[in-house]
Amino acid sequence: MKIIGFIFVFLLISCKNDVKSDDKDFAKLETETIQNELEVYDYEGLKKFLNTTSDKTYVINFWATWCAPCVKELPHFEQLNSNYSDKKVEVILVSLDFPNKYDSNLKPFIKEKKLKSKVIALNDTDSNTWIPKINEDWSGAIPATLIFNKNKRQFYEQSFNYNELETEVKQFLK
């Protein structure tokens, strides 16, 4: 009887340790997934996202976790991405966070806010060169948004609420 009790306790302890190990492995896997999902580009790498010949309309939002107006409007871009995914609209969030803050700020932010839109980090310190290539009138202030398809292109150096954003996107879907 003591042997059965000993085996039962041993199995219970073994299972308990396995669960903790699995939880740690899952947390590690989840962290690695977020790290792997963050694509980092310089301007040359970003250029492929700034033009299209397809029938899709792209909404490219330039933002950062340290920019309060940017963070405030992000849910509107997420809602647009969700509501218009079947209408050939894709939202891409281009983070201008500092590279040394990707691990401490950006990746945890993406996870915490459960962002579903594609998030790209732009790591190019030569902003005086790439900002005017995105739009010659852009001062560099964020939030800023570029909406385009193969027929039309419009740049906005402003914050959006959902209705304003949707109104602008609908002009591209006509």
Image (cartoon, helix red, strand yellow):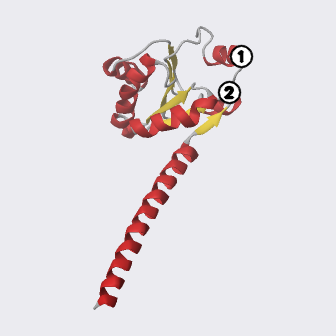
Residue 53 shows up from this direction:
no
Quadrant of the image occupied by residue 104: top right
For badge 1, the amino acid type reads: Thr
Crowd rating for badge 1 (residues with CA inside 10 Å; few <14, some 14–19, many 20+) = few
Residue drawn where x is 68% and y is 27% of the image: 43
Crowd rating for badge 2 (residues with CA inside 10 Å; few <14, some 14–19, many 20+) = some
Residue drawn where x is 34% and y is 90% of the image: 3
Which of disc 2 and disc 1 is earlier in sequence? 2
Residue 118: image location, x then y, percent = 50, 37
Picture disc at residue 166: none
Which residue position holds label 1?
Answer: 129
Residue 105: image location, x then y, percent = 52, 32
Element under label 1? helix
Q: Quadrant of the C terminus?
A: top left
Element under label 2? helix
Mark 1 and mark 2: span between their CA atoms?
Answer: 9 Å
Residue 105 shows up from this direction:
yes
Which residue position holds label 2?
Answer: 43
Residue drawn where x is 59% and y is 12% of the image: 140
Camera-nearest residue between 119 and 172: 119
Quadrant of the image occupied by residue 135: top right
Residue drawn where x is 65% and y is 33% of the image: 41
Relative vertical location of residue 154 with respect to residue 12 in this rendering, above or below: above
Quadrant of the image occupied by residue 12: bottom left
Residue 139: image location, x then y, percent = 59, 8
For badge 2, the amino acid type reads: Tyr
Marks counted in the figure total 2
Residues tagged 1 and 2 counted as in contact (Cβ below 8 A) = yes
Relative vertical location of residue 88 with respect to residue 32 in this rendering, above or below: above
From the viewer's perspective, tell me whether residue 43 is left or right of residue 146. right
From the viewer's perspective, tell me whether residue 58 is left or right of residue 81. right
Camera-nearest residue between 76 and 24: 24
